Amino acid sequence: MTDTLRPLQSPDPLDAVSPAAPADPGSPQKLKRSIGVVGGTLLTLSCVTPASTLFVVVPDLFSSLGTATALTIAIGSLLCVGVAFCYSELGTLIPSAGGEYAMVSTMAGRLAGWLVFVLSLLVVMIVPPVIAMGTADYLTPVLHLDPSYAGAGVMILATLAGLLDLRANAWITGIFLVLEVVAAGVVAVLGFAHAERGPDSLVDLTVASGPGGHGVDTVTAMLIVSGLAIALFVTQGFSTAVYLSEEMENPRSNVARTVLATLAISSVIILVPVVAITMGASDLAALTQGDISGMVTAWSNSAVGTFVSLCVALAIINAGIVMVIQNSRVLFASARDKAWPTPVNKALSRLGASGAPWVATLLVGVPGAALCFVNLDTLYGVTGVSVTGMYLLVAVAALLARRGSHGSGAAWRMPLWPAVPVVLIAVLAYVLSRQEVSYLAWTGGIVLVATLYWALYLRPRRETRWLVSVPEEEWAEGTSG
């Protein structure tokens, strides 16, 4: 039996509220249900932010993996199908804004849930500024900005947008999403139209090396395995559907639909242009350099290159908005679940007039702006390790999801259980073992500090702290039939 508590229960009467009781400042607050599958899919796709991932993250994969980039992303996408199955089952069984940590806490115990929360917090704090700093490169055709200041500006803008009503944000991000899909489509069409090599190049795994990039190295299987951590990060945003489950109408059915549809759509939007770029790059050195905007201009003209660059800049702003929305919900849920000292919990759980957790939103956006002025060379590696470790713990929770009363709960059920989570656990553990020691050390050190916080503060106060909750109305809905 795991060390968990049921929804919004607490021995402290100030910490509990019945569905009929009026809300008061000391009561746990619930987020407003305002979005369906379409709105949730738009928000979730925007968090995957295919175009900004394609233009900001994928070039780093090209530099290390060359023609093996498409294969690595394809393998990562296949692994993510199994991960999406786990998220869909757990997310419909435990529909909470806490996302991974609520699911893992309920199934595998509060310590495991706390560690997942810390890993997810690492990801949600690092990824937005990393992506935001790419804005400057794609505004270059019209405006020259310092990457750090441009990234900080994007984070502030995203924070302001995150304070709006969620339905309004769904429309804003939906418009931006259309533009970024158009940009990715233009890249794909131009790349295929100017193909310099055939489909066989996708399995001729080479990367440029040496002075000027005129040498050629073979990409080994171990390099591909090491790159899988970043490849998993490329499509990682589909988990946003789980974070938004508390604000979705009919979460028991809509969460799974949103998770699986988002993964399928985002994989196509990212993978097809990567294949086109691999085939259309003028030579191996140009591919390894990863200057996608330069390739687009060479394939067409400067006007098209400028259009694509501006679409990507908008996509990055779009990603910032959705990431701030998602990440603020994580902090909101952690406060509602009493993860922090009382004053912090009260502040983080405050909702504004729009229904957004405004203090949590500010605490995500403002530090994110500050991180744009930090050297982020190591952060891709730390993010890759964190995402892989988080997926591994989610797979463990999915393996335990059919024990006891959970097995009869109303939820979407994955096919091929328990084979899917078992295989995922083995593969993800292996991927972790192939990461650089420095990345593992940074992430491990943070996890160690978090474990000490658990041991010294949370565990001794287990009756009043880290009371992982699922909104009562959803728990009743899920278990009533």
Image (tube, rainbow, N blue to C red):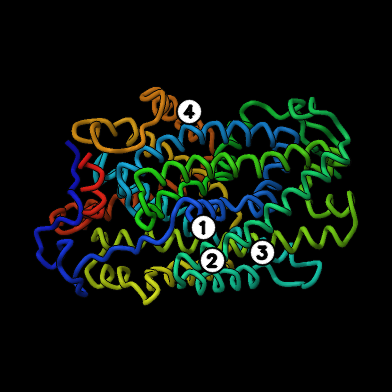
Q: Does dot 4 land on a helix, a strand or a loop?
A: helix
350 versus 423 height, above or below: below
Lower position in the chain sequence, tag 2 or tag 3 = 3
Q: Distance between the residues labelled 4 and 1?
A: 25 Å
State the residue in front, 386 or 277.
277
Q: How far apart are marks 4 and 3 (CA)?
A: 35 Å
Rendering coords of residue 163 (x, y %)? 45, 72
Lower position in the chain sequence, tag 1 or tag 3 = 1
Q: Which residue is drawn at 40% across and 61% down?
A: 34
Residue, disc 2: 371
Lower position in the chain sequence, tag 2 or tag 1 = 1
Look at label 4 and name its amino acid. Val
State the residue in front, 197 or 386.
197
Q: Nearer the viewer, mark 1 or mark 3?
A: 3
Q: Distance between the residues labelled 2 and 4?
A: 32 Å
461 versus 285 height, above or below: below
Q: Distance between the residues labelled 2 and 1?
A: 8 Å
State the residue in front, 20 or 76.
20
Which of the numbered marks, if any, corresponds to residue 427?
Answer: 4
Q: Does dot 3 land on a helix, a strand or a loop?
A: helix
Look at label 2 and name its amino acid. Leu
What is the crowding at mark 1: few (fewer than 14 residues within 10 Å), some, or many (at least 20)?
many
Q: Nearer the viewer, mark 4 or mark 3?
A: 3
Q: Is residue 256 left or right of residue 150?
A: left
Residue, disc 1: 126
Which of the numbered marks, if any, corresponds to residue 314?
Answer: 3
Mark 4 and mark 1 residues within 8 Å of each other at the beta carbon: no
Residue 232, located in which quarter of the rendered image?
top right
